[in-house]
Amino acid sequence: MIRFANEEDLQNILNIYNDAVLNTTAVYTYKAQTLESRQIWYKQKMEEGYPVIVYELDHKAVGFATFGPFRPWPAYKYSIEHSIYVDPNYQRKGIATSLLKEIIAIANEREYRTLIAGIDAANEKSIAMHKNVGFEHSGTIKAAGYKFNKWLDLAFYQLNLNGPKNPVEE
């Protein structure tokens, strides 16, 4: 079941995120986060009106997804960047794809124009998943990050959404 996250999900969200931090190049950071930092993150998402959704299975959140601003300047207000993470014990079950499709639906409902994914260029499974739902490669930044004693290339993929009926410059 996919639903909006609540504060009771934050420990599972933290565990999933920290696994990605410590064991993968899905996120270009080095240190595990604390529950307090995830609580601040969640509160900020709620205050700014950005969704945090979870995939619930076995009575717990086993994956989560969200989106937020792509860049801070006003003209980017119709572009968002998303994140999806799944518990390693529940991967390869279609959970990430289900979460991605739900994030796309929410973004379309909210009249965003462009959904952006920043993906480690070596993450072939994530790239294939994004391509399968219509994302297109829009560029790669070589040696954008350094983790696990190697340089990492960051590939950007984008999905064009419906966008607003009447965009404004405000």
Image (spheres, grey):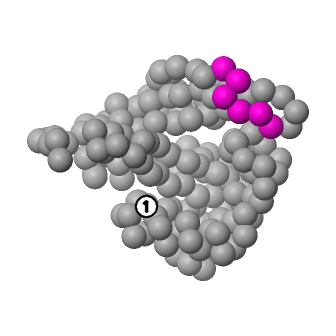
Asked whether 145 falls inside the magenta stretch, the response is yes
Residue 74 appears anywhere in the view? yes
Residue 38 horizontal/vertical position (percent) = 62, 68
User: Farthest residue in the left direction?
Assistant: 166
Q: Is residue 144 above or below residue 62?
A: above
Residue 155 horizontal/vertical position (percent) = 59, 26
Residue 55 horizontal/vertical position (percent) = 57, 61
25 horizontally vs 40: left or right: right
123 horizontally vs 112: left or right: right
* Principal secondary structure, stretch drawn in magenta: strand
Residue 92 horizontal/vertical position (percent) = 71, 44
Residue 165 figure quarter: top left
37 horizontally vs 112: left or right: right
91 horizontally vs 76: left or right: right
Asked whether 65 falls inside the magenta stretch, the response is no
Frontmost residue, 17 versus 48 = 48
Residue 112 appears anywhere in the view? no
Crowd around label 1: few <14 · some 14–19 · many ≥20 (10 Å)? some
For the point 25% across and 46% down, which residue is it? 111
Residue 161 figure quarter: top left
Tell me the magenta residue range.
142-147
User: Farthest residue in the front direction?
Assistant: 73
User: Farthest residue in the bottom direction?
Assistant: 8
For the point 64% across and 69% down, which residue is it? 37
* Kind of residue indicated by mark 1: Pro
Location of mark 1 (residue): 51
For the point 80% across and 37% down, which residue is it? 147
Q: Secondary structure at mark 1?
A: loop
